[in-house]
Amino acid sequence: MMARPSGVDEDNIFYLSSVGFAPDFNPRAAIEQDLDALRSFPGVANAIVTNSVPLQGGGWSQGLRREPGEDIESTGVALYFVDEHGVEALGIRLAAGRAFEAHEIRPAQDNFDDGSQAIVTKAFAKELFPDDPNPLGRTFYSYTDKPIVIVGIIEQMHGAWVGWDKLDNVLMFPRIKTGPNAIYVVRTEPGRRDVAMREIEAKLGNSNPGRLLRWVRPFDYFIHNSYLEDRNMAIFLVSVTSALLAITALGIFGLATFNVSTRIRQIGTRRAVGARKLDIVRHFLVENWMVTTAGIVAGCGAALGIGYWISVKYELPRLDLYYLVGGVLAIWLIGLAAALQPARRASGISPAVASRTV
């Protein structure tokens, strides 16, 4: 999950959140002034004002229909309000169609249910029109049956909620969201994000005494927070797996040491009849390999069986075999490494000492 591409230019994007508090605060004029300042700032590629941040954990969503009618099943989608600079400001790639044009940007409203054009992701278009390989230009409908035409298709983009099964369903609407609260998306030239963040925060913070900059954060801040639980789970699982491997290695080491201590006379006898040190080491390593392999066979059978049951019961993906193969190789190496020291100690036993041992 954490490796899924967000579809936007993650390394060069940051966000600003602004809130107006003065009685005479003019949201529309403030947004226009801020956008002019941001787009003219050195090192800034483009900027927009929007209503939500991808992977923020909160945002706008709606159920839309392929055909008009209340009895038609709706498909969930995350909504982003952008202007004609939206595609460039987010750094997303269009698989088909075009970006919005300036004359298509609608007046600010708190909803979008007046029919319009839309830019959608491939995933959302495929869910709406599964039988159409090229849904560009197709019409779908809002919850009040207003028509919306697809003018562009995004290759990939994420919504706000990483745990949502519709994470890849995204719709851009030609609208500028205004009000006392505003979220700006700023995309910089490569390598200039951090410097631009500091300078823009200082400049915009003093440009309008009737508003407050709430926060200025890079896009990867939201990625980190959204996947925090998944990252902690990964750390926990790696820790548990490492502990289990360590316990396995200690068990193998203890078993090999026990075998050496109970077979000193046998080892001495073999040494007396001409066995080399390498022969003794090889004997214990092969013996340990056979025991380890028996455990691996039982473990692989359990992993495949339990994995199949989990995949059926909870509709999860089945265990990839390359994980199993990698685990087998890792256990073999750990087993040999754990048995090497006891085997070397056994090879150092002299025939004279062994012959006196009863």
Image: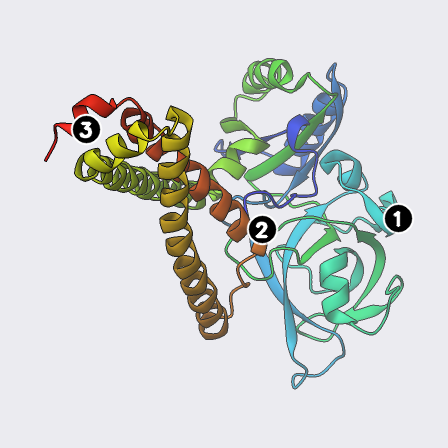
Number of on-image labels: 3
The amino acid type found where label 1 is placed reads: Arg
- Judge left or right: residue 85 versus residue 31: right
Q: Residue furthest left?
A: 358
Image x and y of residue 63, in percent: 62, 68
Q: Is residue 21 left or right of residue 171?
A: left
Between 263 and 131, the residue placed more toward the observer is 263
Q: CA distance from mark 2 to mark 1?
A: 41 Å
How far is disc 3 from disc 1 in space, using C-alphas? 85 Å
Could one spot residue 24 in this view of the protein? no
State the image coordinates of residue 44 (x, y, percent, origin top left). Answer: 73, 21
Q: Residue 292, percent across and down?
A: 38, 48
Q: Amino acid at mark 2?
A: Tyr
Q: Which residue is mark 3?
A: 354
Element type where label 3 sits in the image: helix
How is the rendered protein coloured? rainbow
Q: Which mark is residue 98?
A: 1
Q: Earlier in the sequence, mark 3 or mark 2?
A: 2
Q: Are marks 3 and 1 in contact (CB under 8 Å)?
A: no
Q: Nearer the viewer, mark 3 or mark 1?
A: 3
- Residue at 77%, 19% (x, y): give it: 40
Q: Any mark on residue 322, and which?
A: 2
Q: Is residue 343 left or right of residue 138?
A: left
Is 263 in front, or is 148? 263
